[in-house]
Amino acid sequence: MKPKLSICIPTHNRAKYLPALLDSIVSQVNENFFWEVCISDNGSEDNTYQIVEKYQKQYKNIRYFRWQQNVGYGRNCLKVVEIAKGDYCWIVGSDDVLVSDAIKNCLDILQSNDVDMMMGGSIKCDLNLVKSQVSDFSSYLSYTHPSKNIIFNLSDVSQFIKYCEKPCGEKFFTYISIVLFKKEKWDGVVDKIKDAWVFNSPWIHSYVFLSFFKEYDNCQLFCLNKNLVFYRGGNFSFSRNDRIKRVFCDLFDFRDVIDQIFSADLVRRIILLKHMQICTNYYCMIKRLVLIKMGTDDYLYNFVKQNCCYTFRQKINFAIVGFVCGNVFFRYFIDLLINLYERRGVGKI
């Protein structure tokens, strides 16, 4: 029988954390649940395969694909949905853990509502899954309708504007583990992607999700007033040398996603950029700072030297933190830049 829900797990060298996720899944399901687990291994060099094989011996609904080498997050994410057979897919980060009854709560909604997408919330934890707080994106409804669920037609501009009324860091589908979606809708968008950079983008999931309400009429998003996952914080998969690359991805690539999808939709484009908490002036200034850090343009160095003020550091941190909802990579990176400038004699920024 075709599964109703495919839980899709893209992974790479997460053998240490993967069992916790798989345990949180299999402990919730039984023969009455129409489910499957799909794992796409991005050429892991640890014992991910052996771990999955152990679970496969116990549960027939777990399928596994492995790349021979690391093909990048974007292609691995696409692959794990490609091998799924469910009506709906739920991509979950391989270091996160499902909340108790999350699968049942999702299936109850999906079996009684013909929606295109569903978004829940998360509980922010530290690296050891010790709960720190309910994160600021724990549920969109916590900002507007705390006691009930709600459905938005995001293809309708007026409802899109209403959906965007209150700030919520992950309402634009940047955090992958809290979004469920119709597989046929995902496939329809992916089939139309022509640009190679999209396939390689760390924001491939955001690109596809945001394209839903551009490509489809009456795109229904069900906002579930329940947490779905424990978000494991502090588990950075980037080396120190690669973190600057991650900064570029977070800061510039997501804006490129918005620009490309909504190039002809000024209203949505403006709203999305506004809720990135970063305006054109901040964007350009940060880009200049990056160029200075790279030592590529003395003119830009002089520009910043002449125009920086004591409040600039606060403005930059506010813009960055607002954009990524507290992503420590950005705060770390901006602090490095500021320290560099102070050592070069610019004075305090």
Image (cartoon, rainbow, N blue to C red):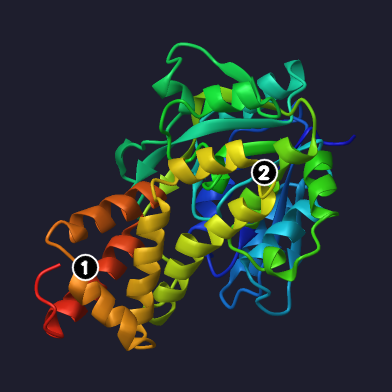
Q: Which of 17 and 222 is in front in this view?
A: 222
Position above or below: 84 against 52: above
Residue found 71% across the figure and 29% down from its top: 155
Residue found 49% across the figure and 49% down from its top: 96
Q: Is residue 293 visible?
A: no
Number of other residues with Cα within 10 Å of mark 1, as a class: few under 14, some 14 to 19, many 20 or more:
few
Query: As drawn, is 249 to the left or to the right of 38?
Result: left
Residue under numbered circle 2: 209
Q: Label 2 is placed on what type of residue?
A: Phe
Residue under numbered circle 1: 307
Q: What element carries label 2?
A: helix
Indicate which label's residue lies in the foreground, 1 or 2: 1
Give the quadrant of residue 210. top right
Quadrant location of the N terminus?
top right
Position above or below: 170 against 4: below
Q: x, y percentage for residue 345?
A: 11, 83
Disc 1 to disc 2, how far (Cα)? 39 Å
Q: What element carries label 1?
A: helix
Q: x, y percentage for residue 323?
A: 40, 50
Give the quadrant of residue 118. top right
> Residue 69 has which mark?
none
Give the quadrant of residue 110. top right
Quadrant location of the C terminus?
bottom left
Q: Label 1 is placed on what type of residue?
A: Asn
Query: As drawn, is 117 to the left or to the right of 150?
Result: right
Q: x, y percentage for residue 114?
A: 77, 21
Q: Residue furthest right?
A: 1
Q: Is residue 39 visible?
A: yes
